[in-house]
Amino acid sequence: MNDTARPIARCLAEFAATQPADALPAAALERAQLNILDAVGLGLAASTYEFAERTARGLVAIGDTGRSPLLGRRERLALRDAMLLNGVLVHGLDFDDTHGDSVTHCSASALPLVLGVGHARGASGRDVLLAYLIALELDARIGRVARGTLQRRGWHPTGIVGAFGCAGAAGRLLGADAHAIAHAFGVTLSMASGNLEFLADGAWTKRLHPGWAAVSGYTAAGLAHAGFIGPSLPFEGRFGLFRMLLGEEVVIDRDAMLAGLGESWAVHDNGFKPWPACHFLHAFIECALDARAAPGFEPAAIERIEALIHADEIPIVCEPAAAKLAPRNAYDAQFSVYYAVAASLLRGRFGLAELDDDALADPAIRALAGRVSYRADPLSDYPQSYSGALVIHLRDGRRIERRQQLNRGTAGNPITRDDVLAKYRDNACRAVSESVAIRICEAVLTLDTAPTLDALIAALESA
């Protein structure tokens, strides 16, 4: 498959078109179902927020009615509009899974795509799971080439990388052959987008990126399946994805990108989020919670705090300082090392409640956030993991130091299946009754044997 004479797009397309559903490892299927359950719970929780209502209102106003299902909402939309809204819902709380090496929120684009297209096509649960795994695999392999560089240049990998994963998954569900899926990747090159300007003022645009990736991938696959021609070198070409976004100096390790395709599965490296914040903050939240649990620790005794962070993460969660030190909204807070550390130390937790307006306005949190500073961390393992450390200076001269090299939720430091189920229940029950949440859970965790998505859709609509 990694014959150097063939374009990368063709090699990836052959994988997407020919990977047999009956050869999927049981462990990969089980993990895919667990990741999907996590994403569904987040979509349900997000459906209760203002951004969800406003997004739905806008899409209803400009679109046509349809039959595609939504997470936590009774109305149905046309397929592409439903994908867009479901992407907003899954990613809207920034509590969704992340593939570490590619720094991509994979499920936030893959689930809306496979749920929408799988339902429209009458696909089996196994075929939907295969398409989901294909999307994640492509996301991981394409995103790894960037190694975190996309963020430094202002791009959001989820919107860009996720579109190619969705093109491959959509092509598989549409029954496209490798030739058509390769063209779909070429078409996607003109559609994939997503930038980080939202960081300046906590705007809502990041929430759109995963759903737009699903829309772009599906549109590209549909066009290519009908014979539309796309560029043959969307990845390694002169104006291909990598050189266009990363510059001429980018190194495309073709062999590494294609090694083990169809044999090893990236879903196992797709980390769950224990806390609803940018993954770059998780090590700092954990360090703060661990320090707070120390016998005799009192937040009032803190003089100042240093956060040790990788240089590439600084522009995302430390700057601009004015917005990060005094978050104007939840999104500002979810990308603020100052706020995350202060709230965790003072409240002993970091959940959705710490993103409510009363928490954001808490004068004690704001005061402690003002005593947090940062410096570059030479010991960070980023992007292999989202490392971080805190040095807490106390007024009596003592120091409390905590370091987390491997953030929780990753393959090397996993949370348990029970942890994921508990997270799902907490999130889902913000929008539906416990009995409905259980019914949805059962439908997701038996997708591998489901003849269609009907049971899952019925459970989602029973709220």
Image: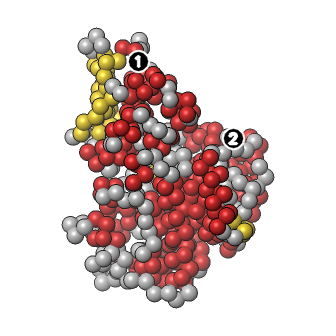
Q: Which mark is residue 429?
A: 2
User: Spatial distance from mark 2 to mark 1, Cα to Cα?
Assistant: 33 Å
Seen from the viewer's position, the closer of residues 311 and 435 is: 311
Residue 423 drawn above or below residue 305: below
Which is more N-terminal, label 1 or label 2? Answer: 1
Q: Position of residue 83 (x, y in %)?
A: 60, 64
Disc 2 marks a residue whose amino acid type is: Cys
Q: Position of residue 417 (x, y in %)?
A: 57, 43
Which quarter of the picture shows residue 215?
bottom right
Q: Is residue 54 visible?
A: yes
Q: Which mark is residue 299?
A: 1
Give the side of residue 233 with respect to residue 115, left or right. left
The residue depicted at 51 percent of the width and 71 percent of the height is: 217
Judged by depth in the image, the label closer to the viewer, 2 or 1, is 1
The residue depicted at 72 percent of the width and 58 percent of the height is: 456
The residue depicted at 70 percent of the width and 44 percent of the height is: 431
Q: Position of residue 254 (x, y in %)?
A: 30, 71
Which quadrant does the N terminus fall into?
A: bottom left
Q: Which mark is residue 31?
A: none
Q: Secondary structure at mark 1?
A: helix
Residue 272 drawn above or below residue 217: above
Residue 84 drawn above or below residue 402: below
Give the side of residue 126 with respect to residue 204, left or right. right
Q: Dot 2: within a 10 Å radius of its alpha carbon, few (fewer than 14), some, or many (20 or more) residues?
A: some
The residue depicted at 63 percent of the width and 53 percent of the height is: 54
Disc 1 marks a residue whose amino acid type is: Pro
